Image (cartoon, rainbow, N blue to C red):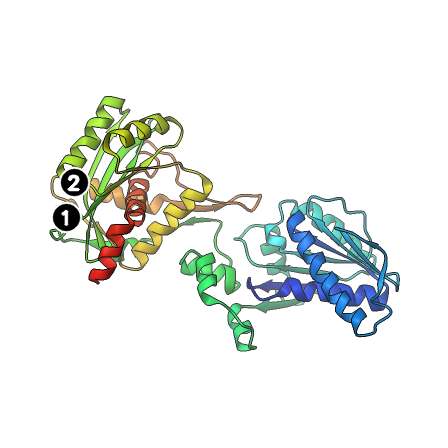
Amino acid sequence: MSICNKSRQIGLSHSTSAVGVLWGAFHGELTTIISIGDRESVEVLDKARKHATVLARLGSRMAMPGRKDNANELSFASGGRVLALPSSGGRSFSGNVFLDEYAYQEHASKVWDAAAAVTMLGGRLRVASTPNGVGNDFHGLWERATAAESPWSAHEISIDDAIGDGYPVNMAKCWELAKGDQRLFDQLFRCSFLDNILQYIPSETIDVSGTDEVAPPGDQHFAGLDIGRENDLTVLLVVRVVNRVAWVVHIETMKRTDSDGLEAMVARAFDRWKLRKLAVDSTGLGTFPAERLKKKHHRVDPVTFTINTKEDLATGLYTSMRNGMLRIPNTDAALPGCEPGTAAALRADIASIRRIVTSAGNVRYDAPRTAEGHADRAWALALARHAMGTESAIVAALRARA
């Protein structure tokens, strides 16, 4: 029994499929590789097929193709086979088992039951995965496997280990996959387990982004509008960009907003701040108001909240704060004209955003719904930052000026 806590992008699927071919071609054994889904299974088997082709070209008779060679099975003249199945597929096998990216498998418990039975019959069991938070089957198995006197052979391979061994790594692509988040980077590439329910933007990052100063003068303004549903707040937040740094200059909230009140709020903002762009939450009940606002003001960007867009909004907000590109008020004194308690409420909303990994391995960004709202000020700020990114001409001008 062997387990590997590994980095992404280091070629482990390539070597996993190679070992399956060696066991099958030269030992006559059956090796079943259980992957996340159909696409991943086909990819692993395709790698195995390429390994077998090379061996056959080098003269190995045992690696010659057998009777079966299809989308899920590769057989050899020796009688050995390699099966590649998704975690949702049927598993009535015996022999060796590879559990590929086990932390991301939706049916991990069922897969484990089958694999454990194979192990008792003397087959080899290999488990490999990039971490995917704590509390799941892979995390628990890793904890047990690395404990004293464990029967497991435990291995850890980080991106740094791969680079040290001469493996070619595109670090820019790695950081892109991690969305610029150091914590996600450490989980994806440095074998760290990130808490499944995490305060996504740490308090220290919020503190570093805080300021007691009023925003310096400028004329580049962008805004985000989070439209409240049921008891949630409707929040309009305006930022001023000065030397590529965004300063929060205005926050306005309304509860149970009707269409007239919403349009009046937006009209005041466009008139006072001469907004370059307004990003509007157009999810559900926000669809119709967003369409009306876009027709009236034109410089409106409707944003539908999905798992992917909320991830982009949350990670964009975190990255801007971590890189010193965003200033939020420490106290109401840094936000003239705001209602009492606005600065503290904004900071609390930012801190309430959670990165949550579901039991199916999906990641979502959300916040608890309370009497105070649903992180509405934080999402309005994230939308304002999004509006900055979509105004390409302004961004280009700011870069040129810098």
Residue drawn at (29%, 32%) of the image: 294
Q: CA distance from mark 1 to mark 2?
A: 8 Å
> Image quadrant of residue 182?
bottom left
Q: Position of residue 246 (x, y in %)?
A: 23, 52
Q: Compared to 81, does 157 lie above or below? A: below
Query: What label does residue 219 carry, if any?
Result: 1
Could you say whether the residue bearing mark 2 is in a helix, strand or loop? loop
Viewer-proximal residue, 274 or 375?
274
Residue drawn at (40%, 57%) of the image: 181
Q: Compared to 359, does 11 lie above or below? A: below
> Image quadrant of residue 110?
top right
- Is disc 1 in contact with disc 2, using a CB cutoff of under 8 Å? yes
Q: Amino acid at mark 2?
A: Lys
The residue to which callout 2 is attached is 274
Q: Quadrant of the C terminus?
A: bottom left
**Left or right, 264 with reference to 349:** left
| For marks 1 and 2 on the same chain, the one whose residue lies earlier in the sequence | 1
Q: Amino acid at mark 1?
A: Asp
Residue 192 seen in this snapshot:
no
Could you say whether the residue bearing mark 1 is in a helix, strand or loop? loop
Residue 328 seen in this snapshot:
yes
Q: Quadrant of the N terminus?
A: bottom right
Q: Position of residue 200 (x, y in %)?
A: 39, 50
Query: What label does residue 97 carry, if any?
Result: none
Viewer-proximal residue, 222 or 229?
222
**Left or right, 292 with reference to 367:** left
**Left or right, 309 with reference to 271:** right
Task: Single out the residue that lies furthest toward the bottom.
Answer: 165
